[in-house]
Amino acid sequence: MPVEPVLENSVSHSSKYDEVPQELHRAMLRLNFPSSYVVVGAYRLFTDKSLYVPAWNKCRNGVRRGMICGFAWMCTSYSIQRRIIKAAITNPSSIFSVRYITRFEETADELSHETLLGFKLPFNISTYVAILLVGSQVTGIISFFVARNIRVARQRVWDQTVASRGKGPDFWQPYVEEWDSPPVVNDRPGRLDRMFKLWFWKLIIQKVILLPLSLYPFVGTFIAAAFKSLSTAQDLHKPYFATKKMTAHQEAVFIEERKWDYRMFGFVAALLEGLPIVGLVFTVSNRIGAAMWAHDLEKRQHYVAAQRRTSIAGRSTGFEAVQT
């Protein structure tokens, strides 16, 4: 049978990694999976003494005082809160009732008496919700005692992570637009947006709206993390934006161009930070992951800036040749 000739100039599918030099391939691989920076940040915090020792030394006194107060609160209030929760979720007229997915028996004292979507549970729903609720309260108590020191620890691990990459202050260059046609964004927040940025309304949203949602069996934790994903990622990259001296408009465009990357990173980060008590540790490790992500994003910025300078120089040379 005849063989079709092979066209030497045929166009083949090229990978997007072909657009960057060899030294950027590993960074681009990481940038394609932004959630991996959360894992890397946790790994570095738990294995790098230059990160976890200063952070622990800064927070240990507050953590100890908070744990003592939190343990006392848990011992005195757990059983009471569990009774209230059970009454709320088993009462058909309650807004917290989960009877439409969970079957409760009137004599449900054993763990196997409750089912979720027809499956027997290894624990009862009221115990699960009570543990999460009391755990969040203990987390709040510890946060009260370490609030100032943990902010310092987060800033220090950011600085130490950046320093460990061997880059000086001149590494962080002014913002460069990477898209030929950047998205149109509204960088002027409305009255409602400005109101939600106030600490009071943030507290209302997190503790009154998202906390009850996160207590919903199983799926609630993921839904709450999804709601907080973008804001969590934005907060973690505030030092990056400040170092590059980006304007509000530049920040808005930069995030809009990478909104799904920020959502993926922020979702995993918010999910870990939402865990009772140990979530405080992840608020520190996520800052490390965010610093490493910022480092790779800055490499990409350098590459785009160099490409644009080369393109401008090429056009200027061509224009001079025409004039001559």
Image: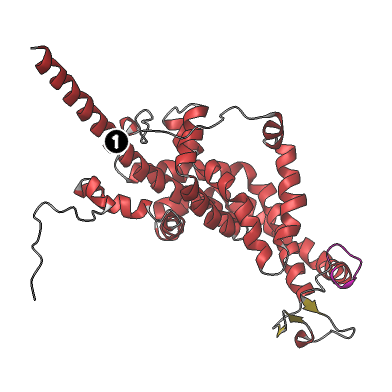
| Residue 146 in sight | yes
Q: Residue at x 49, y 40 (%)?
A: 256
Q: Residue at x 67, y 34 (%)?
A: 193
Q: Residues within 10 Å of mark 1 (few under 14, many from 20)?
A: some
* Depth order, front residue of 91/287: 91
Q: Which residues are magenta?
A: 89-96
Q: Is 16 contained in the magenta span?
A: no
Q: Position of residue 137 (x, y in %)?
A: 74, 57
- Mostly what secondary structure, the magenta segment? loop
Residue 92, placed above or below residue 117: above
Secondary structure, mark 1, is helix
Identify the residue position indicated by label 1 in the image: 304
- The answer to which image quadrant residue 176 occupies is top left
Number of callouts: 1
Q: Which quadrant of the figure contains the C terminus? A: top left
| Residue 69 in sight | no
- In this rendering, would 203 be left or right of 230? right
- In this rendering, would 169 be left or right of 1? right
Q: Position of residue 230 (x, y in %)?
A: 56, 46
- In this rendering, would 219 be left or right of 155? right
